[in-house]
Amino acid sequence: MLDYPKALVCVFVLMVLQVSVTPQLYPFGGGPDLIAILVVALALWRGIELAAVAGFVGGLLLDAVLYRHLGMTSLAYLACAWMVTSFAGRGEAGAGMLEPAPPRPLPWVIAGALLVQVCLVAVQLLLGVSYDLGFLVWHQIVPSLLQTTLLALLLLPLLRRLFRPTRIRPDVSAAAAV
Amino acid sequence: MLLSKNRVIRRRAVVGLLVAASLTLLTMSYREGSTGVVGSVQNGVTEVTAPFASVAHRVTSPFVDGWHWTTGLINARDQTARLHQLEAQAGRDAATIQQQQDQINMLKGQAHYVQQNARFKTVSGSVIIESPDSDTPSVMIGIGSDNGVQMNDPVVAPSSSGGALVGRVKEVTGSTATVQVLLDPAIGVTASVQNRQGANGTIVPSTGTPGELTMAEVPQSALVKDGDTVVTSGYAGKLGSYYPDGIPIGRVTYVQNDDLGQQSKQIQVTPFVNFDNLSGVVVLELQ
């Protein structure tokens, strides 16, 4: 249960860094998505529940601070958590969920960050905001993916120390009861 | 197994609730805008996070400044190198433009040159070899007998304001011709001073002043002044001149009035043609 406070503190710290520090370092548009890194790491190492809660809270905070429509970014992070747990072999079945060992997180961070960007654009389009597609790709999505990947190389080892993956074997007693 | 099922149900319920909450918030936010509950939530979150953001900003600002200084230095170096490249490129472009402008002026001159003597027709050509400073100053042009050029054809340098005498064809091949220019000591052109009665003489290169011409054998009685224009006299007959009359040669810059009983005087003439920079010529062919 200690995972939830740790995850929420991480969400808050990363959100503050994302809105206050990284825009100064990356003046070329885009900007790294630190929350997406956290959501992917939690999805791989702790399952969808914690990842979804972290993504929801992180998205909510970002939307509130950046004065966007509340819930928009939360939806994108929820989709990211679902995608990673579904396609990385991290099914939501309880016992034995962490068998086999989790895959390397970096490719999933890239895929997750891309999905977040695509979801945000899709929600914006559904809300009636029009974009220049070329500008969006080359000045928002691609820079954001590159910066997220670079920062993931630094952030993932730290997150791994906080949320070290534990290997839980299948529930033998439950299987025997059947 | 029952535990596992409960866990699955709980996780699905949590995720479903979060999705539903997100959609609800999104709908409310879209409907209310920045007012109402959503606005107050946003304001509250901003108030809570603002101090932390401020602290994070202050803590990281030295690193950010260092980053900006480094990237600024790199950008400044890149920009300097790029400016040098642009400067060199601009120099090359200016030279190319000047060359093209000269070419255009030459072609304009050739195109607009009007031959007033009905006995001649004109053929334009470019100078391909230039040697005005040699013992026998001449230029080679890129047209020859294939274009109708013949020995002793007069050659003029056209310009947008008219034309001036260069010399005459000395040798000719199928595709080239060598032009003996006015600076060649072997050349002699009968000339007269425009609008001056009896001011006739022969144009030869000036012996003391390279690039200048001398009009010799001008009668002492002829009245000539600085600034007068010298043109070909072009007399006809059995031993007639190769040059048609009226082709400008140069401008009078000095008149030597000899009072020692000589019958003729010398006049210094500056040619209109710049023999150091001759690019295009027109050959006058006898029809």
Image: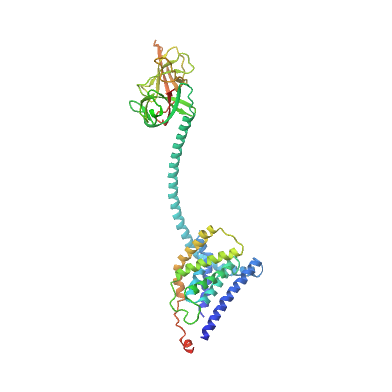
Q: Is residue B132 left or right of residue B23?
A: left
Q: Position of residue B264 (x, y in %)?
A: 40, 13
Q: Relative to A53, does residue B96 appear above or below in the rendering?
A: above
Q: Which residue is found at the position 61% from the left and 62% from the top?
A: A128
Query: In this orientation, which residue lies closer to the viewer: B128 or A105?
Result: B128
- Residue found at the far left of this picture: B135
Out of B39 and A92, give the one closest to the viewer.
Answer: A92
The residue most toward the top is B261
Q: Quadrant of residue B128?
A: top left
Number of numbered markers: 0
Q: Residue furthest bottom?
A: A177
Residue B196 image offset from top left, x and y in percent: 48, 16
What percent of the width, then of the height, locates residue A36? 51, 69
Look at the picture and state if A32 lies above or below B204: below
From the viewer's perspective, is A54 left or right of A107?
right
Figure colour scheme = rainbow
Horizontal and vertical percent position of residue A174: 48, 87
Q: Left or right: B144 with respect to A130?
A: left
Q: Could one spot residue B177 in this view of the protein? A: yes
Q: Residue at x 48, y 60 (%)?
A: B65
Between residues A97 and A33, which one lies in front from this camera angle? Answer: A97
Using the rendered image of the protein, determine whether residue A33 is visible from the camera's viewpoint: no
